[in-house]
């Protein structure tokens, strides 16, 4: 990969759009080649002067998306993984059995299940708390015992907001690291490392890629320290590596990250404000609303918008919510978020009976369509559900 790149003082949106300006040194192509090789040639003396041995540990195709993300997050280094779950669980697998961790009560459901199931059987001690309540977080952290505090903000699917800077102070005072799932805010709106976090994780399947055609995950660190070295070892030894074509698609997606997130955020705010006063809606959960409990913190740590995710609680309960989702024409009934197309989902039926999600809740992922069309479609679906 070409080492020539654009750097500061250019805006992060410019860095993303040009993927740092990398150019293939052989062909001068502005899109870098994909490297599908799984192995690399040894030197005559049996060494590896290129530093590459085997693609499970390293691949040139990883370098560009990792470099772009490191610049966007203002970090020291990044790694791409085969999925968001592979990236997130790697952080916990880099800990030792018996270590204590704190995570949110409301968070990405698959990771919550993994923490309360596999991670505890493996030997981690896990406490789930409302991390938006700093007193509860402070009480849950055990000085000298807690090794990791995990945050997700805004937290899926209630979109509760945690003060990252305050959480970092609490974690560090106890001798713990702070890791933040920044999937929903993206580096367009929030840079957790600048607020004191040690690691930021993304389910890159979502906004970073943005086109619903790649499964990927990422980690970015504030310091390339011993813990980061353990994370690199986990990726190589467990084998959660991204494919070279997927790495290329991830870079392609990040080049349009800023305009996509800005459009989705603006539309989400319009949708939230409209349905906050709709007679068929019991409540709208969105940190961009001034009435939202997390609005003040979100306004302080989210610059330029409040994200493209919101939830509505439908008047009439679970049945009305399910019927509303059944009557949409433009919104797509599908799992996931962060793509260019808008999605709607009844989360309680997906997560099951132990879910903390209210049964009347519909999760909305706002894409880049015209906001007025999305509003009209959801409004007619609400009326049809109550007809």
Image (spheres, grey):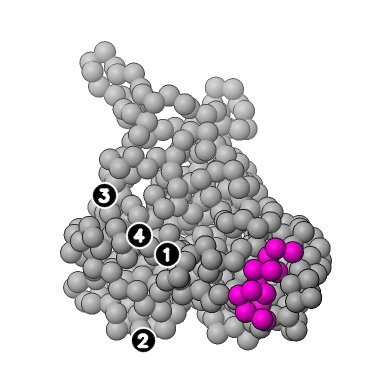
- Mark sitting earlier along the chain (1/2): 2
Residue where numbered disc 4 is placed: 114
Q: Earlier in the sequence, mark 1 or mark 4?
A: 4
Q: Are marks 3 and 1 in contact (CB under 8 Å)?
A: no
Q: Is residue 327 left or right of residue 123?
A: right
Q: Which residue is mark 2?
A: 135
Residue drawn at the location 26% of the way across and 49% of the way down: 230
Magenta stretch: give its range.
Answer: 309-327
Residue in the foreground of this view, choosing between 384 and 277: 384
Identify the mark nearer the N-term, 2 or 4: 4
Measure the alpha-carbon separation of dots 1 and 4: 17 Å
Distance CA(mark 3)–CA(mark 1): 18 Å
Density class for disc 1 (Cα within 10 Å; few <14, some 14-19, many ≥20) is many
Please give the label number shown on residue 305: none
Residue at screen point 38% across, 62% down: 113
Within-10-Å neighbours for mark 2: few <14, some 14–19, many 20+: few
Instruction: Quarter of the image for the C terminus: give it.
Output: bottom right
In the rendered image, residue 304, in percent from the top left (x then y), is placed at 64, 68
Closer to the N terminus: mark 4 or mark 3? Answer: 4
What is the number of the mark on residue 180? 1
For residue 143, side relative to residue 61 (left or right): left
Mark 1 touches mark 4? (CB < 8 Å): no
Residue named by callout 3: 230
Q: Under tag 2, what secondary structure?
A: helix
Q: Secondary structure at mark 1?
A: strand
| Cβ atoms under marks 2 and 4 closer than 8 Å | no
Does the stretch in magenta take in 320? yes
Alpha-carbon neighbours of circle 3 within 10 Å: few (<14), some, or many (≥20)? Answer: some
Around disc 4, counting alpha carbons within 10 Å, would you say few (fewer than 14), some (14 to 19), or many (20 or more)?
Answer: some
The Cα atoms of the two marked residues, 1 and 2, are separated by 19 Å
């Amino acid at each position: 990969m070409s080492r020539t790149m654009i750097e500061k003082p250019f805006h992060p949106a410019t860095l993303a759009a040009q993927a740092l300006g990398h150019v293939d040194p052989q062909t001068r192509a502005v899109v870098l080649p994909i490297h599908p090789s799984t192995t690399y040639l040894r030197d005559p003396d049996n060494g590896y002067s290129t530093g590459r041995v085997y693609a499970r540990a390293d691949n040139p195709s990883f370098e560009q998306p990792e470099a772009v993300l490191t610049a966007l997050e203002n970090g020291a280094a990044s790694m791409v993984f085969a999925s968001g779950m592979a990236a997130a669980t790697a952080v916990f697998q880099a800990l030792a059995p018996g270590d204590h961790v704190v995570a949110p009560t409301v968070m990405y459901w698959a990771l919550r299940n993994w923490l309360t199931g596999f991670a505890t059987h493996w030997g981690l001690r896990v406490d789930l708390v409302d991390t938006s309540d700093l007193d509860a977080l402070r009480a849950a952290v055990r000085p000298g015992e807690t090794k990791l505090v995990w945050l997700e903000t805004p937290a899926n699917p209630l979109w509760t907001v945690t003060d990252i800077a305050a959480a970092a102070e609490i974690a560090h005072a106890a001798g713990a690291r702070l890791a933040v799932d920044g999937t929903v805010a993206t580096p367009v709106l929030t840079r957790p490392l600048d607020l004191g976090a040690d690691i930021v994780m993304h389910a890159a399947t979502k906004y970073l890629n943005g086109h619903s055609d790649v499964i990927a995950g990422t980690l970015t660190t504030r310091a390339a320290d011993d813990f980061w070295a353990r994370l690199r070892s986990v990726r190589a030894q467990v084998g959660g590596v991204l494919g070279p074509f997927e790495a290329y698609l991830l870079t392609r997606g990040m080049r349009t990250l800023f305009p996509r997130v800005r459009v989705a955020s603006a539309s989400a705010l319009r949708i939230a404000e409209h349905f906050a006063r709709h007679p068929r809606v019991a409540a709208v959960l969105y940190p961009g609303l001034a009435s939202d409990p997390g609005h003040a913190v979100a306004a302080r740590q989210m610059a330029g918008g409040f994200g493209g995710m919101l939830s509505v609680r439908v008047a009439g309960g679970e049945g009305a919510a399910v019927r509303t989702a059944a009557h949409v024409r433009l919104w797509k009934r599908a799992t996931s978020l962060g793509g260019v197309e808008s999605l709607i989902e009844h989360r309680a039926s997906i997560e099951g009976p132990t879910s903390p999600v209210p049964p009347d809740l519909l999760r909305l992922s706002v894409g880049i369509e015209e906001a007025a069309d999305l509003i009209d479609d959801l409004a007619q679906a609400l009326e049809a559900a109550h007809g």
